[in-house]
Each structure stands twice: as structure tokens, then as C-alpha cells.
Image (cartoon, grey):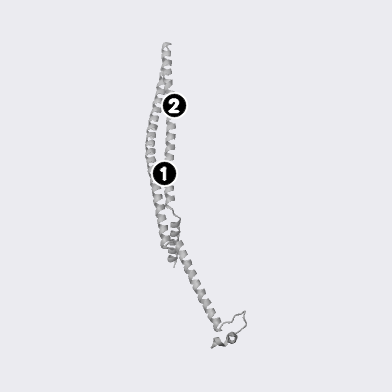
């Protein structure tokens, strides 16, 4: 019994979900998710590009310091200060190392940026293709649904038309019942089995009244015949 009840509830739940589910909404949701992914990729490209640009600016600043170290070393040598010239050259070497490190990082970010751009282009093409396919599928679904609705309406297979057919059938049944009941009541009233509550006469009274009315009508007809014969000239009668 419990399994049967569970199966019934599951069937009703599935039917309710089937009515609520709209594949067009699912297509739109899938498209929105792809657009969000594309937006994230573009945001990542912007962030990587900004980071690469910052490193390039720092590398340029350090690179612009290299000639100054050369000038300092040369000036120190002219002044006989080889120790200072060595310090300047060491600073130049350290700065050059930093520049090379920045350049390596810039190259890595540039490669990552290129990969993101390529991925963004592929994803953009995928999103555009899905959008076109989505609209085609939505149009096909709408047309198919309209065809089914029209077919159900014509054949009376839809739930709405079934309800209408049931209402018509119930109305016809109720009308037939009322007609049968009315005919039965009329027959019972005529036969005297039932009495009219507003009319205190019995069936016998109504029968006597009918006989009295018939006698009155017969007497009136006889009076008219006698009057007609009296008014007619005898020659005409001959």
C-alpha cells in the first residue's frame, strides 16, 4: 500500500514538474552561464594585461638607470676612485639582473595573456554559436508546442478540452435527469398520486370539475345550435 501511494505521489510530482519545466528557460540559463564564463575570461585578460604593464613600467625605470651607473663609474675612474667605480658597476649589474627578472616575468605574463586571448576568442565563438542554436531551438520548441496545443484543442485531448467535455456531459446528464423528474412529477400530478400544495382539490375534485366543464361546454354548444336554427328562414331550410 505504501509503495503504491509513493508511486502515485511520484507520478503526480513528475507530472507537475513536467508542466513547470520549460526547456526554453533552461537554454537561456545555459547561455547566461556561458556569458558569465566569457566575462570572467575577459576580466582575467584585463588583469593580466594590467599586471604585465606594471612590470614593464618598473623594468623601464630600472633600465633607464643603467646609463647613470656607467657615468658614475667613469667619473670615479677619472677621479682615481676605483672603489667607487666598482660600487657603481656592481649596482649596474644588480639593476641589470632586476631588469632581466622583470623581462622574464613580462614574457611569462605576455604568454599567459596570449593564451587567455585565444581562449576568449574560442569561447566567444562557442557562445555565439550556442546563442544562434538556442534561438533556433526555442523557436522550434514554441512551434512544436503550438502545434500540439492546436491538435489537442481540435481533437479534445487537452486537459482544458477534457474539462469542457466533462462539463458538457454533466450538463446534458443533469438536464436529462431534470426533464425525467419533471415528466414524472407531471404524470403523478395528472394521475392524482401527488397533490398540488397550493391547490386544495383532490384528483376526484379535478375529475368532477372536468366533467362539469365538459357539460357546460356541451350545453352552450346546444344553445348556439338552437339559436342558429331559429334565426335561419324556413325557405332556406327547405
Residue 225 position in % (x across, y down): 57, 86
Q: Is residue 69 above or below residue 174?
A: above
- What numbered label is drawn on residue 34? 1
Residue nearer the viewer, 118 or 142: 142
Q: Relative to 126, is 168 on the left or the right?
A: right
Q: Is residue 172 above or below residue 154?
A: below
Residue nearer the viewer, 51 or 94: 51
> Quarter-wise, where is residue 7 in the image?
bottom left
> Quarter-wise, where is residue 105 in the image?
top left
Q: Residue at x 39, y 40 (%)?
A: 124
How many residues crowd around disc 2 within 10 Å: few (fewer than 14), some, or many (20 or more)? few
Residue 213 position in % (x across, y down): 59, 85
Q: Residue at x 39, y 48 (%)?
A: 136
The residue indicated by pointer 2 is 57
Whole-angstrom CA distance, mark 1 to mark 2, is 35 Å
Furthest residue to the top? 79
> Quarter-wise, where is residue 154 in the image?
bottom left
Residue 79 position in % (x across, y down): 43, 11
Residue nearer the viewer, 222 or 235: 235
- Quarter of the picture containing the N terminus is bottom left
Q: Is residue 100 above or below residue 37?
A: above
Residue 164 in view here: yes
Residue 119 position in % (x across, y down): 37, 38
Contact (Cβ within 8 Å) of mark 1 with mark 2: no
Residue 208 in view here: no
How many residues crowd around disc 1 within 10 Å: few (fewer than 14), some, or many (20 or more)? some
Secondary structure beneath label 1: helix
Residue nearer the viewer, 230 or 31: 230
Of the numbered discs 1 and 2, the one sitting upstream in the chain is 1
Secondary structure beneath label 2: helix
Amino acid at each position: 500500500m505504501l509503495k503504491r501511494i509513493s508511486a502515485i505521489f511520484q507520478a503526480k510530482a513528475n507530472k507537475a514538474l513536467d508542466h513547470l519545466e520549460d526547456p526554453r528557460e533552461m537554454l537561456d540559463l545555459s547561455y547566461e552561464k556561458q556569458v558569465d564564463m566569457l566575462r570572467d575570461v575577459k576580466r582575467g585578460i584585463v588583469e593580466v594585461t594590467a599586471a604585465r604593464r606594471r612590470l614593464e613600467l618598473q623594468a623601464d625605470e630600472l633600465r633607464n638607470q643603467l646609463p647613470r651607473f656607467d657615468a658614475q663609474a667613469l667619473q670615479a675612474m677619472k677621479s682615481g676612485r676605483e672603489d667607487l667605480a666598482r660600487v657603481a658597476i656592481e649596482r649596474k649589474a644588480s639593476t641589470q639582473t632586476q631588469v632581466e627578472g622583470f623581462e622574464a616575468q613580462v614574457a611569462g605574463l605576455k604568454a599567459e595573456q596570449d593564451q587567455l586571448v585565444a581562449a576568449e576568442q574560442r569561447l566567444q565563438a562557442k557562445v555565439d554559436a550556442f546563442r544562434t542554436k538556442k534561438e533556433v531551438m526555442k523557436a522550434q520548441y514554441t512551434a512544436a508546442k503550438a502545434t500540439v496545443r492546436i491538435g489537442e484543442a481540435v481533437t479534445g485531448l487537452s486537459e482544458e478540452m477534457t474539462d469542457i467535455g466533462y462539463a458538457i456531459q454533466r450538463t446534458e446528464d443533469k438536464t436529462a435527469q431534470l426533464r425525467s423528474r419533471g415528466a414524472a412529477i407531471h404524470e403523478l400530478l395528472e394521475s392524482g398520486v401527488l397533490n398540488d400544495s397550493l391547490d386544495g382539490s383532490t384528483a376526484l375534485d379535478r375529475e368532477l370539475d372536468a366533467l362539469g366543464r365538459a357539460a357546460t361546454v356541451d350545453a352552450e354548444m346546444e344553445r348556439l345550435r338552437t339559436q342558429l336554427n331559429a334565426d335561419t328562414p324556413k325557405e332556406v331550410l327547405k
